[in-house]
Amino acid sequence: MSIMDSASKKQTFHNDKEKKKSNPNQRKSLDQGICKESELDISYTIRLDSTNQEDVEKKVQCLKHVLEKDLRAADLKWSLFVAACNTYRYDTCLKPFPPMYIKNECKDIEALRRAIEVIPPLAVILKALSESDVYEKYGMAIDLLQWVLVRLRDPYIKSIKKENYDLILRKVPSEMPVVAPNLIFQVTSTKQSTSEDRWKTIAQGHTTFYAYHGSRLENFHSIIHYGLQQSMCKNSLFGKGIYLSSELGVSLPYSPVGYGWGGSVLGSEMSCIALCELINHIDVKTGDSEDDARSLVSDSMGGRVPNKYYLVTNSELVRVRYLLIYSQQVQAARCINNKGLLAWFKQHKLLTFVLGYVVLLASVGLTHNKQVEKYYKLFAQKVGLE
């Protein structure tokens, strides 16, 4: 038994020794495996960083293209977005809402407003987009601007040249004298626009015409993206629907001056009128028609639709085609360009009138003053006038 025990102990000792010899190789193999996994992780991270870098470069290039193509139009679209963001009615006006500021299905409006506050003028952004480290400086701004100006591409807004303004305004001949807008922009749909296709389908077999629609500045972000269905008056005297007019002067009071964006080249304060195209359909009521079917809504408490008004009971029958902008800063810039004393008199007409009246009274009083006549004669003798 003792010999067997001794042999058993030797065998056990030998096995332990073999295990000890094998452990360094196992540890080495394990370390190599960990290194390989780490290399895979690093490689995967590099690929992710590369993909993110590609996404960033794509965002920067797309945003740069939009700003270079039409800076004023981009400025207007952004200003309408900011106006919708800053109103207390943002829950209804700010549609669509940027998804990157939605947390746990809640709209983080305060974070969005803080992000907007630090965004510089678009001309500054455009210049910075050529720099290699632009995303490090303006990453949040680029993400938000790219979403508003690039991702929300249907519809897109385009500047209209000044010489074409009269041609556009003649689409709805006005009888009332009214101040012309400072700027006009065209609202155009993409080829893949389902809403535009639906409108064209309904319009088949019908004529179309144009009319004006006035609304508050903060409403236009949702209007250009979702149409005028949110502008339907539910408790109006002449019935439920969207109200438009054939007179620009009638629509202007419904578009008070609102605050857009402080960094805008168009001005921080502006008002906006939509020039819309309507399908000549039975659901478009007009005050100029003698037919009750075309001038009266079933829930009307005030009777027929008034003259110069249109009432659309189906929002799919109307499309926004142009935006007419009244900007106080543009008007101020024009006044500044007219420098000199004459320009000052034009800007201060009441004060000029008062000063002129005072000068007239003084001249009349002085001509009947004997002392003044005496000094005038002495002066005339010295200079040889007498």
Image: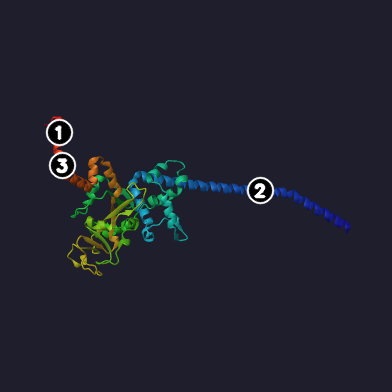
> Disc 1 vs disc 2: which is toward the camera?
1
State the mark number for residue 366.
3
The amino acid on which the numbered mark 3 sits, given as a three-letter code, is Leu
Where is residue 313 shown, x and y percent of the image? Answer: 27, 64
Per the model, the C-alpha gap separating discs 1 and 2 is: 116 Å
Write down the quadrant of residue 295 in the picture.
bottom left
Residue holding disc 1: 378
The amino acid on which the numbered mark 1 sits, given as a three-letter code, is Leu
Q: Earlier in the sequence, mark 3 or mark 1?
A: 3
Where is residue 25 shown, x and y percent of the image? Answer: 71, 48
> Disc 3 vs disc 1: which is toward the camera?
1
Question: Residue 131, relative to residue 37: is it above or below?
Answer: above
Residue holding disc 2: 31
The quarter of the rendered structure image containing the N terminus is bottom right
Image side of residue 134 versus residue 239, left or right? right
Per the model, the C-alpha gap separating discs 3 and 2 is: 110 Å
Image side of residue 232 versus residue 53, left or right? left
Where is residue 308 shown, x and y percent of the image? Answer: 20, 60
Would residue 341 be seen by someone viewing this image from the given angle? yes
Instruction: Report the residue that reaches farthest toward the left.
Output: 386
